[in-house]
Image (cartoon, rainbow, N blue to C red):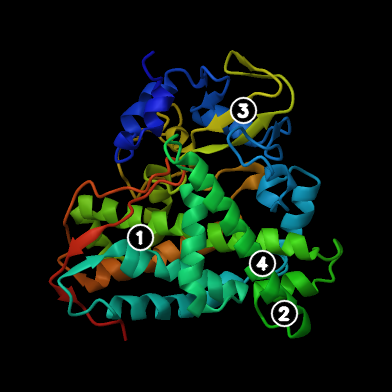
Amino acid sequence: MAPSVFQRILEYANRADPYSLYAELRKTPVRREEDGTYVVSGYEEIVALLHDPHVSVGRPQPGQPQDAAKEPRSFLRLDPPEHDRLRRMAMRHFGPPHSPDRVDRLRPEMLKIITDLIDGVAGRERIDIVDDIAYPFPVTVICRILGVPREDEARIHEWADAVIESLDPREEGREERLRRRENAMVELHRYLGAIAAERRVRPGDDLLSGLVTDGGPDGAMSPKEVEANGTLLLIAGHETTVNLITNGMLTLLRHPELLDRLRHEPEMAIGMVEELLRYEPPVHLRSTRIALDDIDIAGTKIPKGAPIVLALAAGSRDPEHVPDPDRFDPDRRPNQHLGFGGGIHYCFGAPLARAEAQIALTELARRLQNPRLVTDPPPYRPSPELRGPRHLLLEIDGVAGPAR
């Protein structure tokens, strides 16, 4: 039997450009796969399901490790009311209303981090945007926010890779990938649990300290809850931003007139990042949904118990929602997209990811002299869900000095 459109999207051969397949997928905005999964690709339909209380993220999914339900889970994998309680507790120390300026206060430090990273490639003729800039930048920032020692980055990288690689849909090597993921999660929980225990005795100004000393109306997180949610924030706090920055630089190099414009108009970074979140988002698919009841949508009944995949990247390019969706336009207004999902599971770290991408892309545009792609398309990471280049090699003529 020939593979379905969705199965072709999952094939690695189509990772570099899945958008024509998304257009084909949208012809049937709610589509049933042979295994009983429902793939939703229209913007309005995705938004409706993101806000539907009859859609759950709290049930173990097909293909997950057998003991997934026994793992302490972060709020990303929980339904209300537990989701709401844990998310509120985490947000008290990260954003409004209790910590409204945490991200803004970090902007000077983020600029210093990106400046040092770009300084580090001066004198080289070839650089890798991923390894040299887009990976170490958000890792350094999230380690600073959580209170994780920066010198442990190598171990964090190894653990995060094991978790992300488990999203590879290929059957070959799947059992080994899931084993590595389980081991990485155990190690990450143990690692963060040890740091959290130290913070209970000697708290600092970091997020982990806030979680273990919180005396707010929701009470305190248990040690296992701190480990699970700390792991979520550590991994999600950098993996998607790596893709956003790398996809952004690739898109700008394919549109050199816009790269030059950003170089001279840094204020356009805000609109440019929003358009990147629509046009080349870091998260393409959300596959951890289950229907809690029969759901009627777009003339289709999704039966109770059916798995649901939300094709966010397809929805953001839905011509029924946005005109000329395949054109990259940083001046697009309005620009409603699904780059950060929606509903109660809207991306927790969206303000931080926006700030990091704005700062990184502005400084890369301003300081890299005559950057040129070595390979287009570049090699991509295996996951169709968290889609981005594994490497992005550039040749450059030099590096301009930092701003004074």
Residue 237, given in percent of the width and then of the height, sits at 54, 61
Residue 349 locus on image (x, y percent)? 57, 59
Which disc, if any, is residue 296? Answer: none
Which tag, 2 or 4, sits closer to the chain's start?
4
Q: Where 263 falls versus 29 (above or below)? A: below
Query: Mark 4 or mark 3, which is nearer the start of the sequence?
Result: 4
Is residue 398 shown above or below 383? Answer: below
In the picture, the disc for residue 199 is 2
Report if the CB atoms under discs 3 and 1 are less than 8 Å apart.
no
Residue 113, horizontal then vertical, whole percent:
41, 78
Quarter of the image with the N terminus is top left
C-alpha separation, residue under disc 4 versus residue under disc 1: 43 Å
Distance of label 3 from label 2 (alpha carbons): 40 Å
User: Which label sits in the foreground, 3 or 1?
Assistant: 3
Label 3 secondary element: strand
Q: Disc 3 vs disc 4: which is toward the camera?
A: 4
> Residue 277: where, in percent of width, then height?
43, 48
Q: Amino acid at mark 2?
A: Arg
Residue type pointed to by label 1: Met
Number of other residues with Cα within 10 Å of mark 4, as a class: few under 14, some 14 to 19, many 20 or more: some
Can you tell which mark lies on residue 190?
4
Q: CA distance from mark 3 to mark 1?
A: 40 Å
The disc placed on residue 268 is 1
Q: Hey, what amino acid is under mark 3?
A: Pro
Q: State the residue lying farthest toward the left.
A: 397
The image shows residue 293, relative to residue 275, as above or below, that is above
Q: Does dot 4 land on a helix, a strand or a loop?
A: helix
Dot 2 alpha-carbon crowd within 10 angstroms: few under 14, some 14 to 19, many 20 or more: many
Neighbourhood count class around disc 1 (C-alpha, 10 Å): few under 14, some 14–19, many 20 upward:
some
Res. 196 visible in picture: yes
Q: Which residue is mark 3?
A: 307
Which of the two discs, 3 and 1, labels the residue nearer the N terminus?
1
